């Protein structure tokens, strides 16, 4: 896949987001909360970038700005050199809560963006069939959301976001609401879909393991105010799905390194095999989160 040295698909330039608040203590008056401060990042075409950070660091706020659902106080975000000014069909969005239309079938949900694009009905059906199959939901096209499991609903949300062929896929904690086993299955499925479609993905998560497993690079945000603390290249081999990579020494060390950054600690010296602390220590440390 692409790396950050390629021509940038997304360029985040000096993003600041400040919210007005009210001081409820002595001397009430307007104050400001700095959610994001001087955020800069480039994402290459076809790259998978994960963003991690503590609660309140501005991860979802940054994704909202990328989606065009919110505006920065200052700074710009460019896609292919064009400034984002609002929502557009060049970006697909997948949220934690599925956000499916309960009165529409799986097929009708998947075809929603195509209807907005005024795609002819016959072509819509052909496209929706392809993406329903891509996410493993053959045989469920005529089911309604209430007839699906949580994991299946999220598959529908991913198919809907991909069906109208956006250039960038934005994902905000998309697997947080499913059980651990389903989450790992969905991670494997997402990697398969990403490899097949070549989409540029920006993925927000609280899970260090998920970020390291999925991404080409992990962006670590600090808080108070939210800013980029570090960007780590994940040099683990691909393909990663259906593999034992999670149990490897390399994976344990990278995961531990992200954890150290989130804990505001210096990354420890290299351990066995040049991968930092022992796998057991890395796993133990990560489990404390």
Image: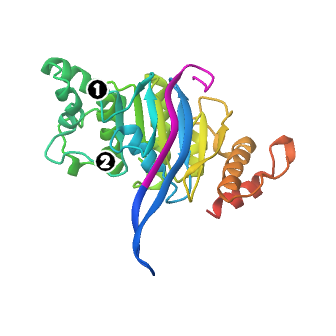
Crowd around label 1: few <14 · some 14–19 · many ≥20 (10 Å): many
Most extreme residue toward the bottom is 26
Q: Quadrant of the C terminus?
A: bottom right
**Where does residue 212 sit, x and y in percent of width and height?**
61, 43
Residue 225 image label: none
Which residue lies at the image location 41% right of the left edge and 57% below the top edge?
A: 19
Between the C-alphas of marks 2 and 1, the distance is 17 Å
Q: Is residue 182 visible?
A: no
The majority secondary structure of the magenta stretch comes to strand
User: In the rendered image of this protein, does residue 245 appear above or below residue 182?
Assistant: above
Q: Is residue 114 visible?
A: yes
Residue 14 is inside the magenta segment: yes
Where, by quadrant of the figure, is residue 138 drawn? Answer: top left
Magenta stretch, residue numbers:
1-18
Residue 249 is inside the magenta segment: no
Residue 98 image label: 2
Nearest the eye: 246 or 98 = 98
**Where does residue 98 sit, x and y in percent of width and height?**
31, 48
- Secondary structure at badge 2 equals loop
N-term-proximal mark, 2 vs 1 = 2
Looking at the image, what colour scheme do you see? rainbow
Q: Quadrant of the N terminus?
A: top right
Q: Is residue 86 left or right of residue 123?
A: right
Residue 164 image label: 1
**Where does residue 94 sit, x and y in percent of width and height?**
36, 41
**Where does residue 93 sit, x and y in percent of width and height?**
35, 39
Crowd around label 2: few <14 · some 14–19 · many ≥20 (10 Å): many
Where, by quadrant of the figure, is residue 157 drawn? Answer: top left
């Amino acid at each position: 896949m692409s790396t950050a040295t390629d021509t940038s698909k997304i360029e985040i330039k000096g993003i600041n987001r400040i919210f007005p608040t009210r001081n409820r203590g002595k001397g009430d008056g307007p104050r400001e909360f700095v959610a994001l401060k001087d955020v800069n990042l480039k994402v290459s075409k076809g790259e998978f970038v994960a963003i991690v950070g503590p609660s309140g660091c501005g991860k979802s706020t940054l994704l909202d700005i990328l989606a065009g659902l919110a505006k920065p106080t200052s700074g710009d975000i460019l896609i292919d050199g064009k400034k984002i000014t609002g929502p557009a069909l060049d970006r697909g969005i997948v949220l934690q809560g599925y956000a499916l239309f309960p009165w529409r079938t799986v097929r009708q949900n998947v075809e929603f963006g195509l209807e907005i694009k005024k795609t002819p009905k016959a072509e819509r059906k052909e496209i929706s069939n392809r993406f329903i199959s891509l996410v493993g939901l053959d045989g469920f096209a005529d089911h309604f959301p209430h007839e699906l499991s949580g994991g299946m609903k999220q598959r529908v949300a991913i198919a809907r976001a991909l069906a109208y062929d956006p250039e960038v896929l934005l994902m905000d904690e998309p697997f947080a609401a499913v059980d651990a086993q389903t989450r790992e299955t969905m991670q494997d499925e997402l990697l398969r879909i990403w490899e097949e479609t070549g989409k540029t993905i920006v993925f927000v998560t609280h899970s260090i393991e998920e970020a390291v497993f999925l991404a080409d690079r992990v962006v670590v945000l600090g808080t108070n105010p939210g800013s980029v603390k570090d960007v780590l290249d994940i040099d683990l081999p691909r393909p990663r799905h259906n593999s034992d990579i999670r149990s490897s020494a390399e994976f344990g060390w990278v995961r531990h390194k992200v954890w150290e950054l989130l804990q505001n600690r210096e990354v420890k010296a290299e351990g066995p095999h040049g991968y930092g602390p022992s796998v057991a220590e890395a796993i133990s440390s990560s489990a404390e989160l």
